[in-house]
Amino acid sequence: MHPLMQHILNSLVYDPQKPLLFNSPFFLFFFIVVLLFYPLLVNKVKVRTWYLMLASLYFYYKTSGSFVILLLITSLINFGLGAFIYNAQSKASKRFYLWLSVFWNLGSLGYFKYTNFIITTINQIFGGQLPLYDIFLPVGISFFTFQTWSYTLDIYFGKLKPLKSFVDFTFFVSFFPQLVAGPIVRASYFIPQIHKKLSLDKDTIAKALILIFSGLIKKGVIADYLSINFVDRIFENPAFFSGLENLLGVYAYALQIYCDFSGYSDIAIGLAALLGFSLPVNFLTPYRATSVTDFWRRWHISLSTWLRDYLYIPLGGNRKGKPRQYLNLMITMLLGGLWHGASWNFVVWGGIHGLALVLDKLLLPLKIMQTKVMKVIGVIVTFHFVCFGWIFFRSPDFSSAGMMLKRIFTAFNGSIFWQWITQYRICAILILTGFVFHWMPESYNNALQKTLTKAPVILQALLLAIVIWVLFQFRSAEIQPFIYFQF
């Protein structure tokens, strides 16, 4: 076989060393091919659904290999249980089928994500030597598990009727723009879009392209460059750096994780829009939050609202008195922390935010008459609290987190700031630029978006060329996966 043909065939097969990512050349090829035939099918709902479902399953195959079978099994089980819940004649039967859904979804997620965490914890507590299992974590399992689970929950709570077509359901679960890192799309939000007539106008296309451009810049320029050239060095060896450098590393990570994750969400929403589908907003300038409660209204909105509606409220929410409300907040945030990863660091991170949310509720009467000055102070305090939490979120273990805090508070050495600026000039420019744009008044951002939306096609094409050139200039030797792929 000709070497070129062999190379093309090899590129079509899953490679665990090179999983398919939005910021990879192969994804551009994949999406162009999808778009090439899409106009011929867009008005034929059944054919369109089959086409996008098969494309999405191939996308997940290229991302996680044979675990596409797990995706299909999870879809089939939740599809069937949704029908059983809806047709059950008694509340007890409905609850039984719902618990089967809980058992499968939490069981499969627990096996892949938490088995070794539980074994390690048991070994640490009891001094055991239980062996760990060689378990590969499927990319995006936390996202598509919560997504399929929302289907049975929405049916149980009477928000949705079950689908008659398994193809429609599989398409909802596997829709590739948001499959592996969100936003977490609820069944009641997405399913009504499957059979609607799709249409694209110039404004929608322009907004979609702007989202994709901004997402690529956030991820490929800011997040990746800061990660490789500064953040990873600090968090891997905090003891080797001064307190100032550690603090700047924390600020840089705050920007990195925001640009990485919101960048993915922007790209996902933009890609979906080009295919005629709407995905929910997942970030609303979270570092402009005036409180921790406000932060969670702005950060990873699809997860925070999922936890609110399917965990916090069913636990009782704020309906059973203040002490119970505070307990429900703590449970929700502890489990939210554990959702992010199989580590006690994530549990502590969730607990810190849980305590902050409880404190927010206790101080709520004092915040009713907030002045502009108090709001500014609230933004500064909230941002630094969130950064404090990121230390535990990013650090590999508690000792590293403790060392970082120790260096910040006991060996600050602020006199080397200008030396740091000289040594990390590009990092400093990216950090400053990133936060300036983030804290820029909303009216400025809206005006910029309107200007770009109304710009001629030639100018938009020029913008695309500039984005590609910038990404090329900042590229690393290896394409960096999105942070939330590990969750």
Image (cartoon, grey):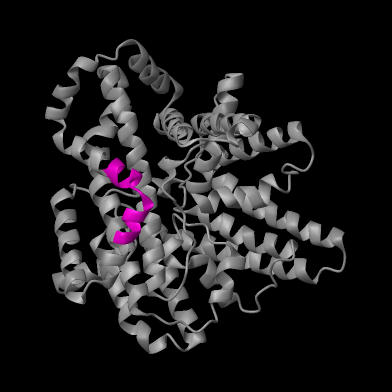
Q: Residue at x 31, y 21 (%)?
A: 238
Of all residues, the one furthest to the top in this rendering is 410
Residue 9 included in the magenta stretch of the image:
no
x then y, percent, for residue 94 = 80, 62
Q: In the shown orientation, is residue 93 left or right of residue 261? A: right
Q: In the shown orientation, is residue 274 left or right of residue 23? A: right
x then y, percent, for residue 213 = 27, 61
Which of the two residues, 384 or 219, is positioned nearer the viewer here? 384
The mark total stands at 0
Magenta highlight: main SS = helix
Q: Residue at x 41, y 69 (%)?
A: 272
Q: Quadrant of residue 177?
A: bottom left
Q: Please determine whether, in this image, residue 262 is positioned above or below residue 26.
A: above
Which of the two residues, 272 or 94, is positioned nearer the viewer here? 272
In the image, the segment drawn in magenta is 434-447
Q: Please determine whether, in this image, residue 198 is positioned above or below residue 351.
A: below
Q: In the shown orientation, is residue 68 left or right of residue 10? A: right
For the N terminus, give its image quadrant.
Answer: bottom left
x then y, percent, for residue 201 = 37, 80
Q: Please determine whether, in this image, residue 353 is positioned above or below residue 268.
A: above
Asked whether the viewer can see residue 12, the reply is no
x then y, percent, for residue 389 = 46, 30
Asked whether the viewer can see residue 112, the reply is yes
Which of the two residues, 296 or 276, is positioned nearer the viewer here? 296
